[in-house]
Amino acid sequence: MAASEENSALFPIFILTIMAIPIVPYTITKLCRAAAKKSKSIHCQCSECSRSGKYRKSIFKKISNVSTYSNLTLLLLWVVMIILVYYIKTMSREIQVFDPFSILGLEPGAPESEIKKKYRRLSIQYHPDKNPDPEAHKYFVEYIAKAYQALTDATARENYEKYGHPDGRQGFQMGIALPQFLLNIDGASGGILLLWIVGVCILLPLVVAVVYLSRSSKYTGNYVMHQTLSTYYYLMKPSLAPNKVMDVFIKAAEYMEIPVRRTDDEPLQKLFMLVRSELNLDLKNIKQEQAKFWKQHPALVKTELLVQAQLTREFAALSPSLQSDFRRILETAPRLLEELMKMAVIPRNAQGHGWLRPAIGVVELSQCIIQAVPLSARKTTSGSPEGIAPFLQLPHISETVIKKVARKKVRTFQELHDMDLQERADLLIQTAGLSSAEVQDIEMVLDMMPSLILEVTCETEGEEGIQEGDIVTIHAWINIKRGNGLIGALPHAPYYPFHKEENFWFLLADSVSNNVWFSQKVSFMDEAAAVTAASKAIEESMEGSGANVKETSRAVAEAVGKVKGGSRLVMGKFQAPSEGNFSLTCYCLCDSWLGCDRKTSLKLKVLKRTRAGSRGATLAEEGPIMEDGVEEDEDNEDGEYEEDYESEYSEDEEDDNSKNKHQAANGTVNKHGQAAEGSSSDEE
């Protein structure tokens, strides 16, 4: 019984130890990560972003950032641990080891005469005949008499002095500090013990496994439903403008789960009238078109109208019940658009090529959603192939201001961006009628906008030329510059209610055949990860070319310096096609800013195979190959594509080739986009 009581008293210590083993190191890790975050401001400081409240460092904002499920769970566990520590510290009865000398108040090794003398004295004080107190009686029987018996018997005393116990050498026991009621298997306690074992050892792991497997079977690593990926893959077509990409985007399974309430009918009807011009309805048969629109699945109708509310900035038309659905749609939009982009560039033919036009359409739709700019604003206008969309992302800029600025022969966004600071201020104040404070906001945003420089090289490792079937290595450096000196930053997006990091997509494509030969996502936010990736890629490349350790170290150090200076390395491989000259285009597209995309031409000459042997191993297919004739059927929609919407990059290719002077020879483009002889581009 004593051992049971001792275990029951030690049970809180056992629980505290089990909890502390994972919680303490996890907490230290989280604190270290929080302390390592940069304190430098990387978001826009203009008045519109300040009014949006996204970056407001109020106590409520801090609490909302801290009040995640993981943080709250961790805090709750720490509270439990503190309670256990307090309980252990203030337990009424402390566990003591039986020590007869201590009980009798004697020094260890005291002679028998002193033991008897001390026993008689304590008997007068605690014996039941002398002290009627029940507690005194209990103490005399359980402690004093037991201690005296253990020390007066010669054998018992010898055993105690030798082994620390009156009964001699004791066996070693190990057990779990469980409470006493669990150790008593008689009666109802036996059922409690059985429930404890079944619950902790069987049911709890089973529940955790079921929850994990059900979630992992439903979502991908990017927290996108598998059903959404399947839908995106089969709905993707080789020619899609942003307004057509919208039809695919809104069919995500996440959006189909958004509840449709009867109370939303009237607000959605009002919203429909406000955004009707953006829905590409045939005005000649407007009644039939409206009826057809409302006959769609209610979730599709609701999703498209709420997305259009973001694009047209019609936030005031949203009822309180629609606000939560609106935020839910916008919160998941970046993840869905990223997966939609992957579905556009996934290999679709035997050469492992994806589709360029839908990829550009996805990026342009992402830009419009983040900046809250209508897709119709991207249509080509007189003097501006990119439309007025880039102007609208600037604070305090409206269509009226754009018309006033156009009278001064400033018709493109790049012309406004390249103007002298004072000249631009005079134009905006005197011509457009903006105030000095508003002009200052515009300058802040222009300083946040990224300017990209591309430096691209394509070559076959260990060989001078590129022959058909070779594995070609693409080596591209993307450098970013901002007026405020930042490398990684959050975009100016006051109408997008969540934090959104900039992401860039590098595409090597043949715009004539609509094929994407190579694609990769690029981010400038995590410098440490970029340094690691660039170092590893350069090291593997140098070792593959037979360079020595000194040359490899020098190349790695140079790459690390470039990364820290604002560059990112893109490296990959693709299989060289059949013999011929190919006019490719390198794109660097931003998913958050309008007017910041860059493209440059790249000429690739593929020779007929003359070398002995075959080094051109076939690249592994990343996706199923489309059957012959599928892409041909989809190309029939080109006319509809051009009629409904003209992309920023959909201009006639022949005109583009005749006007584009930034061409390269033998698969090389330098950082200024000019032609360069040979296969080297080490130009600083």
Image (cartoon, rainbow, N blue to C red):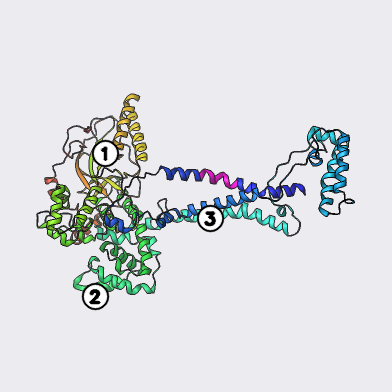
Q: In whole angstroms, how far apart are the C-alphas of marks 3 and 2?
A: 50 Å
| Residue displayed at 34% across by 67% down | 302
Residue that numbered label 3 is attached to? 210
Q: In whole angstroms, how far apart are the C-alphas of marks 1 and 3?
A: 45 Å
| Residue displayed at 51% across by 56% down | 211
Mark 1 residue crowding within 10 angstroms, few (<14) / some (14–19) / many (20+): many
Name the kind of residue labelled 3 in the image.
Val
For this rendering, which residue is in front, 616 or 174?
174
Q: Is residue 145 visible?
A: no
Mark 3 residue crowding within 10 angstroms, few (<14) / some (14–19) / many (20+): few
Residue that numbered label 2 is attached to? 287
Name the kind of residue labelled 1 in the image.
Ala
Residue that numbered label 1 is attached to? 476
Instruction: Check disc 1 and report its element: helix, strand or loop.
Output: strand
Q: Seen in the image, is 123 located left or right of residue 565?
A: right
Q: Earlier in the sequence, mark 1 or mark 3?
A: 3
For this rendering, which residue is in front, 136 or 443?
136
> What is the x, y in percent for residue 356?
25, 50
Instruction: Check disc 2 and report its element: helix, strand or loop.
Output: helix
Mark 2 residue crowding within 10 angstroms, few (<14) / some (14–19) / many (20+): few
| Camera-nearest label, 1 or 2 | 1
Q: Is residue 65 visible?
A: yes
Q: Quadrant of residue 106?
A: top right
Q: Dominant secondary structure of the magenta stretch?
A: helix
> What is the x, y in percent for residue 9?
69, 49
Q: In whole angstroms, how far apart are the C-alphas of marks 1 and 2?
A: 52 Å
For this rendering, which residue is in front, 609 or 458?
458
Q: Could you tell me if the residues under marks 3 and 2 are in contact, i.e. CB atoms within 8 Å?
A: no
Q: Quadrant of residue 123?
A: top right
Name the kind of residue labelled 2 in the image.
Lys
Instruction: Judge whether 538 appears above or below 371 on screen.
Output: above
Residue 22 on the magenta segment: yes
